[in-house]
Amino acid sequence: MAEDDALLSDLMVENVISLNPETTMKQAADAFIRYGFGALPVTDKNAIIPGVVPYRDVMNLKHRILE
């Protein structure tokens, strides 16, 4: 647990796992399984985050996509 006066630069992770707009649902599902995150950011080529994909949204659709 961080102290209240801790700097974000001391806590942040520099190598962020993210998806991009061209990531397929299968690739997204594989990333969730591999890393165990509850959500992943979607980043564009300029490292802008246009959105976040929750685990449940990908995994609830996984069975329909992979059939």
Image (cartoon, rainbow, N blue to C red):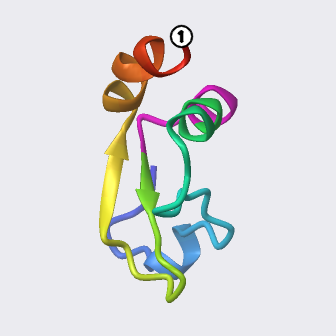
Quarter of the rendering containing residue 14: bottom right
Q: Residue furthest front?
A: 67
Is 57 included in the stretch rendered in magenta? no
Assign a secondary structure to mark 1. loop
Q: Is residue 45 above or below residue 64?
A: below
Q: Which residue is mark 1?
A: 67
Residue at position x 43%, y 74% in the image: 6
Residue 12 place in picture, x, y as percent? 54, 69
Residue at position x 46%, y 62% in the image: 21
Is 36 included in the stretch rendered in magenta? yes
Q: Is residue 45 above or below residue 18?
A: below
Position of 3 compared to 4: left or right?
right
Residue at position x 47%, y 22% in the image: 65
Mark 1 closeness class: few <14, some 14–19, many ≥20 residues within 10 Å:
few
Position of 34 compared to 28: left or right?
right
Q: Residue furthest bottom?
A: 46
Residue 7 place in picture, x, y as percent? 44, 80
The residues colored magenta run 32-39
Task: Using the image as rendered, state which of residue 41 and residue 45 is in the foreground.
Answer: 45
Task: Using the image as rendered, state which of residue 4 and residue 11 is in the foreground.
Answer: 11
Residue at position x 50%, y 37% in the image: 25
Task: Using the image as rendered, state which of residue 64 and residue 51 is in the foreground.
Answer: 64
Residue 30 place in picture, x, y as percent? 64, 31
Marks counted in the figure total 1
Q: Amino acid at mark 1?
A: Glu
Residue 64 place in picture, x, y as percent? 41, 14
